Image (cartoon, rainbow, N blue to C red):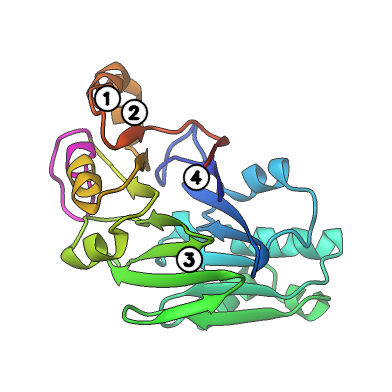
Amino acid sequence: MIIKFLGVGEAFDETLSNTSIWVRAEGAESGKSSVLLDCGFTAPPSFWRNCQDPDELDAIWISHFHGDHFFGIPALLTRFWEMGRKKTLLIAGQEGVEQIILKTTRLAYASIMDKFAFELQFREIEPGESVRTAGLSWRTALNGHSRRDLALRLDSGGKSVFYSGDGLATPETLTLALGCDLIIHEAFRLDQNIPNHGNILSCIDFARLAGARSLALVHVERNERRNRREEILRVIADVKDPRVFMPEPEEEVEI
């Protein structure tokens, strides 16, 4: 699996795009798979800079219905139409994903979907389900956030990645993350406990309990990332197992 951190910022960061992760996998049985995890209002330009093939992307995952995680969908779809996309696109998420995405896209560009030469397919993937689609195995668990948020685990070819969306870890998300190669977790603060968000220290504990090989910290609050950056880097440098890092925009890792 190749993981590209197209965006790593929180909702209102003026310098960093909203958190959005591009996952590419290749397996003997499934062929190539290309999935975008969340697409907020500032995320699409990062995708366009890194991918000029309108048919490259197989699927989009929406963790929850806050604007910094899905308001970029209308722009992304419309540019796919401009670029001549033909391939069916899967949009997956929790219950209600189809109605919300269609409503949002129509609000942004009233009749644009009538012009699409590609089909949109929708798939709800609720906790307790194990789904194989777009060449990957998908499982979800409920995270602790102010709006219902589903953490996601993707497995392919013996490799696995966990993405929290936003929110506090739960016993259910810990079970989901067990043994993952890479955990990508929202970590709003370094050490402060605030409602509905994780922090860096608790995410490190979570990754250790899960037995993960690596932990990527994303969605760090803009002033925390800026003003406490050196302190954060010292904290994570002292962690030897798992490997912990705070990815930069468009950084790429392979697992």
For marks 4 and 3, give the one nearer the viewer.
Answer: 4
For marks 4 and 1, give the one nearer the viewer.
Answer: 4
Can the viewer see residue 148? no
- The three-letter amino acid code for the residue at tag 3 is Ile
Q: Residue furthest right?
A: 84
Question: Does residue 132 appear left or right of residue 180 in this picture?
Answer: right
Distance Cα–Cα, label 2 vs label 4: 25 Å
Q: Answer whether residue 238 is magenta in the image.
A: no
> How packed is label 2: few (under 14 Cα within 10 Å), some, or many (20 or more)?
many
- The three-letter amino acid code for the residue at tag 1 is Ile
Magenta: predominant secondary structure element?
loop
Q: Which residue is mark 4?
A: 255
Q: Which residue is mark 1?
A: 232
Q: Residue at x 18, y 50 (%)?
A: 209
Q: Which residue is mark 2?
A: 225
- The three-letter amino acid code for the residue at tag 4 is Ile
| Residue range highlighted in magenta | 190-202
Distance Cα–Cα, label 4 vs label 1: 24 Å
> How packed is label 4: few (under 14 Cα within 10 Å), some, or many (20 or more)?
few
Q: Which residue is mark 3?
A: 62
SS under mark 1: helix
> Which comes before the other along the chain, label 3 or label 1?
3
Distance Cα–Cα, label 1 vs label 2: 8 Å
In this picture, is 159 found above or below 147? above
